[in-house]
Amino acid sequence: MDIVTKSQFEQFKNQFSLSALSDSDAFELFVIYCVVSRYVKSDTVSKDLINELNVGNGNDWGIDGAILVVNGRIVTSAQEIDDLLTANNSLHVHILLVQAKTSESFDIGNLGKTLDGAEYLIKDILGETTLPSCNEDLTEFRYLLKHVYSKSADFSDNKNPRLSIFYATCGTVNENADFTSRIAKTKEFLLSSDLLNLEGVECNLLGKKEIIQLYKETKEQLKADIKVEQKITLPDVPNITESYLCFVKFAEFKKLIVDEQGEIRESVFNDNIRAYQGDNAVNKAMSKSLLEGNLNLFTSMNNGITLIAKSMRPTGMNIHLSDYQIVNGCQTSNVLYNNMHLVDIDDLQLIVKLISSEDKVIQTNIIVGNNSQTEVKREQLVSLLESQKAIEDFFIAQNKYEKLYYERRSKQYKNGDGQIPQYRIVTIPFLIKAFVSMVLAEPDKVGGYYGSIVEEFDKNGQKVFSPHTNPALYYTSALACFRMTECFTDYLIDRKYKKVKYHLLLAFRLMCEKYSLPDFNSHRIEDYCDHLCMILSDKQRYTKWFNASTKLVDSALKRSPVDSDRSSSDFTKRLKELAREINEYNKKNK
């Protein structure tokens, strides 16, 4: 590994606390992180997530990373796919496969294994049964693929999934005739299957130069320069630095929503209340107007687009935007993107409101105000709840135990001074699943998309985020999940328990607690949480208790965990019963 690649790689290992891993294992995670970060920019890619995406554990069909991206989100369960379909009415699917080697050269044999692996995945969907065996992680991914294809009638714009294959080494890319012909052979088969997008099958060779570029991209702040035709300065408002109402040609506007690969930037719609709704009646009408050439009518009928930026600098008719979000106009932007091929569309005039503010309260009020006429979907606005600020403040103030950083707004720590290691960042999905599993004691109910989890509990009268819940409970559950992830990464817990890791989290609390969980706003909560956090601050102690928890899981299952256990309420019930029996026995025999 050359000195430049080594430097970037070591920085990554430090940021994700991976020093205990061998270079070959850590390099797999490094490349997975780089690839995923290019295609999924709306969410922070956590240590827990890249571990979950890593299937390279032997008998892996030459695949180290298997990633399924649906509607711009990484999914790891069938329930998440179903939830995204319910929320967005359609599915836009992208399959990413990664193989990474620390060698200095590209090997046709290694590439061939990965290409064979891609073919096996498609053959599996086609129903072929004479396939080589594979490990449990890859088996789970195969099930996930089959599930998404069972929803093929709902594929966005009737487009089949895209497939991108990546083979990475620390050498220099030099694609010879052998590589070209081997890649062409696999592409011919994949395209003949009629299961993939004809224009969306690619095989990418990544050398040290390409990997370094991908890693640099993970740190880049979202920036754009656009030229506006006309602009009107809006009245002064406290804590708003700049605000304009502008006419912007689509030729300029698309700089905001289309990335260097020609893909739509899903990340710029992260704060838009409604995700893209696909080919619904309103979006069909917009597309029809464009297809019929009624560009002026389109402008007149459209409500306009609202964008918030942390920084905005006007220079004449040009405006430089930094760290921006489109908070209203997701549907319009996506329809325009889907029709970029139309003649004269670059001349289409859009009404765009540009606002610059770093004040979080102002940003929240603008987001809600610009979307007050729309139904709030279940996966949206979680980060805008008042209780989120209290949780964030508690994490910031915490100085007794492990320093963690709660990210209530996606990527809010990305553009900091680099002093916050990424493995210490706690995302909203991470916290929800940890809290519901460990504190609410419902680990079988965290398999879906995180917004759906919140909505389901709200329906049943039990709020996941309540202003009456002591924030210490959120921190403690996050710390426990953080430590569990470390144990899996460092092979301190048998990886077979990853299938039921949220049950393991509940088992840990039940085994360690010195008395039953008090009311969530009780004065005793601080003492309850301190007891658990003290254990979680001592590696020897928490490793011992997590391994004791695996024994409780074994007793509840009476066999090794399987995929279906993670959603089993009977398993949850049995786990609680056994823990209660053990605790009662220990009390009697003190």
Image (spheres, helix red, strand yellow):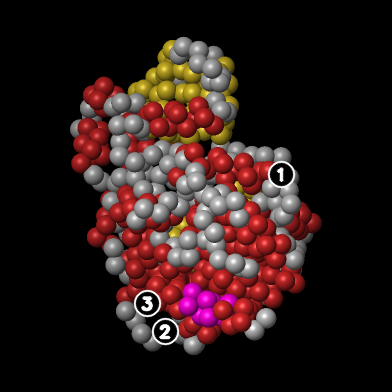
Mark 3 lies on residue: 124
Rendered position, 34 above or below 573:
above
Q: Bounds of the magenta span?
A: 575-583
Q: Position of residue 341 (x, y in %)?
A: 33, 39
**148 left or right, relative to 556:** left
What element does badge 1 sit on? Answer: loop
Specify the amino acid type for callout 2: Leu
Specify the amino acid type for callout 3: Asp
- What residue do we see at 45% from left, 65% from top? 442
Q: Check disc 1: other Cα within 10 Å, few if <14, some if 14-19, many if 20+.
A: few
Quarter occupied by residue 291: top left
Tag 2–tag 3 contact (CB < 8 Å)? yes
Residue 303 — which label?
none
Q: Position of residue 429 (x, y in %)?
A: 50, 54
What element does badge 3 sit on? Answer: helix
- What residue do we see at 41% from left, 38% from top? 272
**103 left or right, relative to 77:** right
The residue closer to the viewer here, 310 or 347, is 310
Q: Can residue 411 be seen in this view?
A: no
The residues bearing labels 2 and 1 have C-alpha atoms spaced at a distance of: 46 Å
In primary-sequence order, the first of circles 1 and 3 is 3
Mark 1 lies on residue: 418
The residues bearing labels 1 and 3 have C-alpha atoms spaced at a distance of: 43 Å
